[in-house]
Amino acid sequence: MARADRADRARTPREALRKVDGRSDAPTVPDFDRLIHERVRLAIVSALAATDVMGFNELKTLVGTTDGNLSVHARKLEEAGYVESTKRFEGRMPKTEFRLTAAGRRALGRYVDHMEALIRAVRER
């Protein structure tokens, strides 16, 4: 086994996590977007990343949540600027549609990059 390989394998888990950010002075556990990390919100932004626009009922079914739960989580994402919603009526029926904003797409990209780096660090160990 090469000397560098042995040194890499000898890293502590803490050092491996520091390597995720590519800096030796990185925090032990690099910051990631906790807003997106929550399961329902991650499902929402992931679903919206795959399409231009998605209706409330379609998103609710895909995410597997209730009306109220989807509303609360979507509102948090809207407040962060990650998701936009439009509300209109078709006849007397309200229609709400969601789309991922450019900021939301960037935030999801950073989150995915972070998780991929963590996975690489674990597999290298």
Image: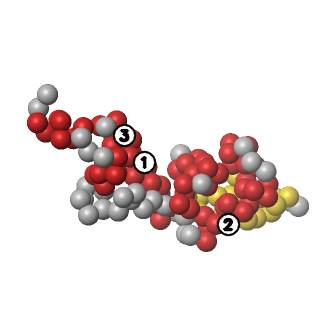
In the rendered image, the residue lying farthest to the left is: 3
Disc nearest the viewer among 1 and 2: 1
Type of amino acid at the residue the image marks with label 3: Val
Position of residue 60 measured from the top left corner of the image (x, y, whole percent): 73, 48
Give whichever of discs 1 and 3 has the lower sequence position: 1
Give whichever of discs 1 and 2 has the lower sequence position: 2
Q: How is the image coloured?
A: secondary structure
Give whichever of discs 3 and 2 has the lower sequence position: 2
Type of amino acid at the residue the image marks with label 1: Met
* Residue that carries the numbered disc 1 in the rendered image: 115
Give the distance between the C-alpha atoms of the residues marked 1 and 3, in whole angstroms: 11 Å
Q: Secondary structure at mark 1?
A: helix
Which corner quadrant holds the C terminus?
top left
Q: Secondary structure at mark 2?
A: helix
Q: Residue at x 88, y 61 (%)?
A: 92
Q: Residue at x 64, y 58 (%)?
A: 98
Name the quadrant containing residue 25: bottom left
- Mark identifier at residue 18: none
Position of residue 29 measured from the top left corner of the image (x, y, whole percent): 40, 57
Q: Is residue 86 above or below residue 51?
A: below
* Residue that carries the numbered disc 2 in the rendered image: 75
Type of amino acid at the residue the image marks with label 2: Arg
Residue 125 visible at all? yes
Residue 9 is left or right of residue 89, and the answer is left
- Mark identifier at residue 122: 3
